[in-house]
Amino acid sequence: MKVSLVSIPVQNPIEAHEIYTSQLGFISKEFDPDANLAIVASRDDPDGTAILLEPCQGNFAESYQKSAFEANLPIMVLEVKNVKSEFKRMEVAGVKLRPELDKPKWGIQNVFEDGCGNLLMIEETPT
């Protein structure tokens, strides 16, 4: 068994699709603005797990999203080969990054804002 699709809460899936594809570097897997449907995937693994950008306004996911953000908890962890180069790319693209890299025993990580109401974490693990 493997994970094929996960969802994350966003205020506006159409705007989130633009942010995830143009700033965060994901590719569009499925996009139907009329149906408010936006699914993205990793450019590095386009056939891997996809992310449904789930509208959360007016339901339980909206309070979950707000609570996780206020508690400084990332709702998803993304793995990259080089955190520093990815941060440079994201900074140029306009992503709001947290200032300090964390260097736990298992690698390098940091939290950033996705621009859609969520905190995400990127990590680089030693090979």
Image (tube, helix red, strand yellow):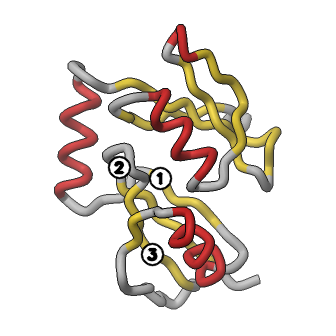
| Mark in front: 2 vs 1 | 2
**What x and y, as percent, mark residue 104?**
47, 87
**What x and y, as percent, mark residue 36?**
49, 16
**What x and y, as percent, mark residue 29?**
72, 31
Q: CA distance from mark 2 to mark 1?
A: 9 Å
Q: Are marks 1 and 3 in contact (CB under 8 Å)?
A: no
Q: Are marks 2 and 1 in contact (CB under 8 Å)?
A: yes
Q: CA distance from mark 3 to mark 2?
A: 14 Å
Residue 55 in which image quadrant: top left
Say what secondary structure mark 1 lies in. Answer: strand
Label number found at residue 118: 2
Amino acid under label 3? Answer: Asn
Amino acid under label 1? Answer: Met
Residue located at (71% from left, 42% from top)? 27
**Which of these two is toward me, 49 or 111?**
111
Quadrant location of the C terminus in the rendered image: bottom right
Say what secondary structure mark 3 lies in. Answer: strand
Taking 62 as reference, is 25 left or right? right
Q: Residues within 10 Å of mark 1 (few under 14, many from 20)?
A: some
Amino acid under label 2? Answer: Asn
Q: CA distance from mark 1 to mark 3?
A: 12 Å
